[in-house]
Amino acid sequence: MTQNIKGFSKLSKEEKVDWIVKTYFSTPETAKGIVSQYWNSNESLQKLHDEFIENTITNFYLPYGVAPNFIINNKSYTVPMAIEESSVVAAASKAAKFWGERGGFKATVINTEKIGQVHFLFNGNSEKLQSFFNAIKPKFFTETENFTKNMQKRGGGILDIELRNKTEELDNYYQLHATFNTKDSMGANFINTCLEQFAKTLENEAQDFLDFTENEKNIQIIMSILSNYVPNCVVRAEVSCPVSQMSEDASIDAKEFAEKFVNAVKIAEIEPYRAVTHNKGIMNGVDAVVLATGNDFRAVEAGIHAYASKTGQYRSLSHAKIEDDIFTFWIEIPLALGTIGGLTSLHPLVKFSLEMLGNPSAEDLMKIVAVTGLVQNFAAVRSLTTTGIQQGHMKMHINNILNQHKASKEEKVQVMEYFKNATISHSLVVDYLEGLRK
Ligand code: MEV
């Protein structure tokens, strides 16, 4: 059967599923059963999800967990986390409790500036282009007034627009580099709309600029788009306590642990192979909250990893030190988040998350997300430098293995009991289960 199809998007959902299962599956009825079991019986809810994207054939579930006991700037939160990886939520809860008992987290938004650029080619005299830009700059503001009115009422808007000469890197390449404050919205639509208007203004005004030659009047717009690199939209989260309080467990020496922890972070600051994994642990927390609050995790990921490379080498996003017997651990990350617009008023679970967080402003959400990244990083590095990561991971993972092998309740109890004190690995768990079944 051919695997190409014309007019797929025009088919109904059932027709799409039928085509997929007949074309790709050896047992179409079983495949259809898998897809349809995830359809929501609440028709209007299903329709809402169908319409978020195109060609929706089903829903893709992720677990939605919560991590309580986060004390951030003296306020208590229960943090929503959408994530598939076992042990992340448990680790966040445990580490949040640890720091809650030591004064909680301090978080500060350092700045909130977003960036967008119009990329264009101008084949001519760059000084004339600069005079042209200076002359028409007010028009960029007046000709976007229709879009900026509402944003200005909320205290945001276009902050500045600069002309940047990039011709040393690419022939004839210039940019309008614009900065924005989008308040509680992530601002992608607002920024892109403004940029597309800037591009039109630039093209049109060039036609009437008397100093330009005919050739110079033909500014070529390449593209207009926001940047997901937001190094001036940064939040800092921090914890600290006396070194003597760094252990809650008599088997771990507080000072030795604190020093080992600081060294582990220093290794991630200088060694890219470790930094990537270290930062991945941070993103376990960051992405889970970003997803649960309906924000764009791809944008956040792209921006954060670029920030981790801002010195020219990929480095740890978090830092740790011991000074005067005080252990301090902190993170600084760029986060362009929204608590209004986008999915926030559409997706019922996103609304639920935001209400559970007390309907935070975008700045408050930045703090919550950064703290969750820090807490996750603390939990991972604590395990790595003490018990090793596998103990906690595999305990949570046992349950997944047991479910995969359809273990009964009684089998689960027996396996869990046995592996309390035994080394855990996938094959050892399966072998033990099979042994029980013999
Ligand atoms: C696993 O998802 C995350 C860790 O690898 C992070 C780290 O190594 O710091 C445990």
Image (cartoon, rainbow, N blue to C red):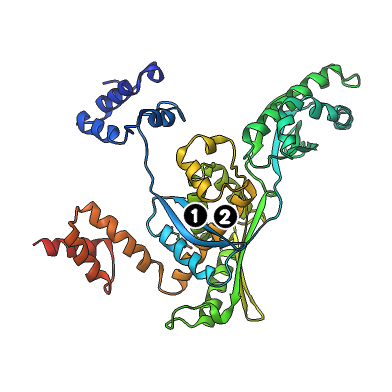
Q: What secondary structure is marked by label 1?
A: strand
Real-space CA distance between mark 1 and mark 2, rounded to the nearest whole angstrom = 8 Å
- Corner quadrant of residue 175: top right
- Location of the C terminus by quadrant is bottom left
Q: Is residue 361 left or right of residue 37?
A: right
Q: Nearer the viewer, residue 176 or 88?
A: 88
**Which residue in the protein does label 1 denote?**
79
Please tell me in which quarter of the rendered image ligand 1 is found.
bottom left
- Location of the N terminus by quadrant is top left
Q: Is residue 84 above or below residue 382?
A: above
Mark 2 surroundings within 10 Å by alpha-carbon count, few (fewer than 14), some (14 through 19), many (20 or more): many
Mark 1 surroundings within 10 Å by alpha-carbon count, few (fewer than 14), some (14 through 19), many (20 or more): many
Residue 160, given in percent of the width and then of the height, sits at 79, 38
Q: Is residue 178 left or right of residue 351?
A: right
- Corner quadrant of residue 204: top right
Q: Nearer the viewer, residue 122 or 245?
A: 245
Q: Is residue 398 left or right of residue 411?
A: right
Q: What secondary structure is marked by label 2?
A: helix
Q: Amino acid at mark 2?
A: Ile
Q: Amino acid at mark 1?
A: Val
**Which residue in the protein does label 2 denote?**
368
The residue lying furthest to the left in this view is 438
Label 1 with label 2: CB-CB less than 8 Å:
yes
Q: Is residue 425 above or below residue 2?
A: below
- Corner quadrant of residue 26: top left
Residue 413, given in percent of the width and then of the height, sits at 21, 64
Residue at the image position 63 percent from the left and 52 percent from the top: 307
Residue 157, given in percent of the width and then of the height, sits at 74, 36
Specify the label residue 169 is tagged with.
none
In the rendered image, is residue 420 in sight?
A: yes
Residue at the image position 59 percent from the left and 56 percent from the top: 314
